[in-house]
Amino acid sequence: MAALEEFPVGSVLEFVRTIVDRCWDRRGGLYREVSIILCVEEARLLWAASKWMEVLQLAEVKSKGSFDFTLAELQWMITEKVNEMKVQGGCDLILGLTQCEMKMMMDIETHLDRYVSRANTPAAKKWPNSKKGKKN
């Protein structure tokens, strides 16, 4: 399996955003279900999103604001989706999301976005353990 260093959090965030963008219909509502065809590289990005959720969870990042799901639930959902795609095999893999899972992807996008924002602030570079998501 690939190392997480191969998948910068910014790249994973952009990928998650493309998935979230596909969840909306023309009227601005969420679809009931979506099926997205992913190539193997995109499936690897989904795996990386799962690992980044695990990093946030291990770093004990606190969720400010109202999230519907915990980091553990989000990480579990993505891991399940990755495992479903592993069974499919082949070059094109189908990612199926229910409406609840789409909302989970939106929470993942928000968590990753906040992590990227914190990591890019000038103050974050002064914190010795800023990569762990904690302030001193």
Image: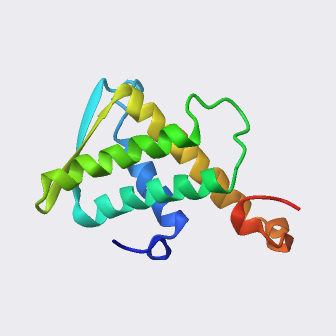
Quadrant of the rendered image containing residue 69? top right
Q: Residue at x 85, y 66 (%)?
A: 123
Quadrant of the rendered image containing residue 65? top right
Front-most of 35 and 128?
128
- Give the answer, above or below, for where 56 lies relative to 3: above
Q: Quadrant of the C terminus?
A: bottom right
Q: Is residue 120 visible?
A: no
77 relative position to 116: left or right: left
17 relative position to 121: left or right: left
65 relative position to 107: left or right: right
x, y (%) of residue 54?
A: 54, 54
- Give the answer, above or below, for where 80 lies relative to 103: below
Front-most of 43 and 136?
136
Front-most of 58 and 135?
58
x, y (%) of residue 18?
A: 39, 50
x, y (%) of residue 80?
A: 33, 44
Q: Residue at x 34, y 41 (%)?
A: 22
Q: Residue at x 54, y 39 (%)?
A: 107
Query: How many numbered circles are shown?
Result: 0
45 relative position to 8: left or right: left
Q: Residue at x 82, y 69 (%)?
A: 122
Q: Quadrant of the N terminus?
A: bottom left
Outermost residue toward the left in this view: 90
Q: Is residue 126 visible?
A: yes
x, y (%) of residue 51?
A: 48, 59
